[in-house]
């Protein structure tokens, strides 16, 4: 007689009584988060574990996850990836205001009383990667152009508005999604989110100080991002949050004409810090060695 081991039992067996967290998704095999958190655990000599937990996209499965986190003494929390970032919200005890604004949670932290807090670290990760990748460059110096209006775009737009971007031009293939995002994130202080047509994407680069690609275009297995950079000032920073490959065609073209370029790995690494520090009680940094280790895990 054989009984299949549940993913929860498998995770508990791997953790072997140590404090642990995990990436939760469906599917979850592709996630690089175990390489990221594994690096920090080893670097700081912490006797903890970070694993993978496949959880089906149904309400009962998410309720089971929340109950597991609450009742398991060594469970410290989890990260969430597609498709759970929104559906987890009603199952948590508190939602951080930034995550509530973005409307999605990617980090769950269990408090000592067993309650669960939800955070979104994508925006923080995006801004930290920008600061790292373009030292001296300032968000406040001019308009930003954001391509895409999906899940990642919500965090990017919210954080750019929060960080004081003076004007934001937003474009998406499905314009209605860009309009909805513009309505949700236009601040009350007179700054504008201008919704532009996807077909005008070459033209709206004129005078921009930042270009961000948050679409999946240019990612391995996806169509290329067709964009003519001629009108983009060479002083602008170009940030492609796609991280497979690391050097997308957009970044290669921007780099060749002298723009400062930021790849998607920095955002991925920086977003992990909030969870790690809360779960394992140690401040961590994004170093060249960490970049190297996670890039190797990506096969980049
Ligand atoms: N670096 C990081 O830490 C990080 C974090 C999160 C995400 N990402 C990356 O960001 C990308 C987007 O992720 P997401 O979660 O936001 O995905 P998502 O919610 O599915 O959004 C996908 C976006 O891409 C657009 N798109 C897809 N195919 C298109 C096409 N053929 N032509 C034009 N636009 C197209 C979609 O436009 P429509 O609305 O018209 O479909 C939408 O704006 C992925 O490559 C992901 O790996 C990176």
Image (cartoon, helix red, strand yellow):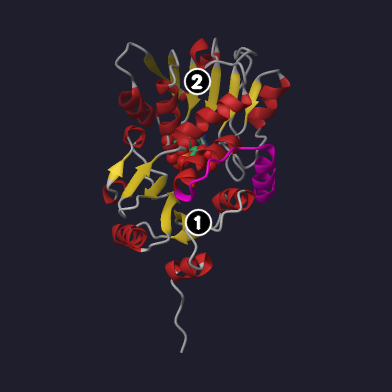
Residue 255 picture location, percent across and down: 70, 23
- Residue 110 seen in the current view: yes
Q: Which residue is mark 1?
A: 28
Q: Is residue 110 above or below residue 188?
A: below
Q: Is mark 2 within 8 Å of ligand 1?
A: no
Q: Decide which of 293, 287 is in the foreground and name it.
A: 287
- Residue 87 seen in the current view: no
Residue extending furthest right? 256
Residues under numbered marks 2 and 1 in contact, where contact means CB atoms less than 8 Å apart: no
Q: Decide which of 139, 282 is in the foreground and name it.
A: 282
Q: Could you say which quadrant of the image residue 102 lies in?
A: top left
Q: Is residue 14 above or below residue 174?
A: below
Q: Could you say which quadrant of the image residue 260 lies in?
A: top right
Q: Is residue 161 left or right of residue 244?
A: left
As for residue 299 lying within the magenta part, the answer is: yes
Q: Is residue 37 left or right of residue 181?
A: right
Q: Decide which of 103, 110 is in the foreground and name it.
A: 110
Number of on-image labels: 2
Tell me which residue sits at (56%, 26%) in the image. 130
Residue 195 picture location, percent across and down: 40, 20
- Secondary element type, mark 1: loop
Residue segment shown in magenta: 279-300
State the separation of the CA atoms marked 2 and 1.
31 Å
Tell me which residue sits at (48%, 67%) in the image. 17
Q: Is residue 168 left or right of residue 130?
A: left
Residue 78 picture location, percent across and down: 43, 52
Front tag of 2 and 1 = 1
Tell me which residue sits at (48%, 56%) in the image. 22
Q: Which residue is mark 2?
A: 145
- Secondary element type, mark 2: strand
Residue 84 picture location, percent across and down: 38, 50
As for residue 104 lying within the magenta part, the answer is: no
């Amino acid at each position: 007689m054989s009984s299949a081991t549940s993913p929860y039992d498998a995770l508990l067996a791997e953790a072997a009584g140590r404090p642990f967290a995990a990436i939760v998704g469906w599917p979850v095999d592709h996630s690089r988060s175990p390489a990221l958190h594994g690096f920090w655990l080893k670097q700081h000599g912490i006797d903890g574990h970070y694993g993978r937990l496949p959880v089906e996209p149904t309400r009962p499965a998410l309720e089971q996850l929340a109950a597991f986190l609450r009742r398991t003494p060594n469970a410290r929390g989890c990260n969430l990836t597609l498709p759970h970032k929104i559906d987890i919200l009603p199952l948590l005890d508190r939602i951080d205001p930034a995550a509530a604004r973005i409307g999605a949670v990617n980090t769950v932290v269990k408090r000592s009383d067993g309650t669960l807090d939800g955070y979104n670290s994508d925006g923080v990760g995006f801004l930290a990667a920008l600061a790292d990748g373009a030292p001296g460059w300032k968000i406040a110096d001019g308009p930003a152009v954001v391509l895409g209006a999906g899940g990642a775009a919500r965090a990017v737009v919210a954080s750019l508005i929060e960080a004081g971007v003076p004007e934001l031009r937003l474009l998406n293939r499905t314009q209605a999604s860009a309009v909805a995002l513009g309505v949700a994130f236009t601040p009350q202080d007179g700054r504008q989110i201008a919704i532009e047509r996807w077909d005008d994407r070459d033209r709206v680069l004129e005078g921009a100080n930042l270009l961000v690609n948050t679409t999946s275009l240019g990612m391995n297995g996806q169509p290329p991002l067709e964009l003519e950079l001629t009108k983009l000032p060479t002083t602008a920073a170009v940030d492609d949050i796609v991280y497979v490959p690391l050097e997308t065609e957009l970044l290669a073209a921007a780099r060749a004409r002298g723009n400062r370029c930021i790849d998607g790995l920095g955002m991925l690494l920086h977003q992990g810090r909030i969870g790690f520090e809360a779960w394992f009680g140690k401040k961590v940094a994004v170093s060249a060695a960490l970049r190297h280790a996670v890039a190797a895990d990506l096969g980049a």
